[in-house]
Image (tube, rainbow, N blue to C red):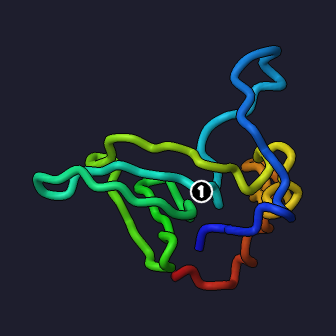
Amino acid sequence: MVSKNKKNSKEYPDVFDGPLRERRYGLRIDDEVEIQYIAGNELKTIRGRLLEFKNDIELVDEEGYYHQIIYDWVVDIKVIKHNRPPPSEDQELLSMKKPKKGGKKSPPPPPDQAYF
């Protein structure tokens, strides 16, 4: 659900100008967003917390319902508020990152072990 507690939340504003290393903007998981999308012949608006945005947009609206919207039908996305720091500063997200490819490889199985 959308966070209504503004007293404990920190501000994570977008930064569009300045040195490249200090710019931060775009969608992040847990952002509060407002999305306009096409449904049939209507233009609808939904507001909620962003869960996923890789292949499509997944969010939970203000009433707690789950929605999945295909990018082809999205007209506009408005970020209302960032609830997490940028990915480069998010300690929880950094701890979940996968190891880089080409790292430690597992040893091959012994020659007497059958492959399936």
Q: Secondary structure at mark 1?
A: strand
Furthest toward the top, the residue is 18
> Foreground: 61 or 113?
61
Q: Which residue is mark 1?
A: 32
Image location (x, y in percent) of residue 52: 53, 60
Look at the picture and state if 23 lies above or below 35: above
Left or right: residue 82 compared with residue 18: left
The part of the image, by quadrant, that contains residue 104 is: bottom right
Q: Residue at x 33, y 47 (%)?
A: 74
Image location (x, y in percent) of residue 113: 67, 84
Q: Residue at x 82, y 43 (%)?
A: 88
Identified by mark 1, the residue type is Glu
Image location (x, y in percent) of residue 94: 83, 55
Left or right: residue 16 compared with residue 63: right
Q: Residue at x 17, y 53 (%)?
A: 42
Look at the picture and state if 50 lies above or below 60: above
* Crowding near the residue tagged with mark 1, few <14, some 14–19, many ≥20 C-alpha atoms within 10 Å: many
Left or right: residue 60 compared with residue 6: left
> Foreground: 51 or 80?
80
Left or right: residue 10 compared with residue 77: right
> Foreground: 113 or 14?
14
Q: Residue at x 56, y 80 (%)?
A: 115
Furthest toward the left, the residue is 41
Look at the picture and state if 58 lies above or below 72: below
Image location (x, y in percent) of residue 66: 44, 75
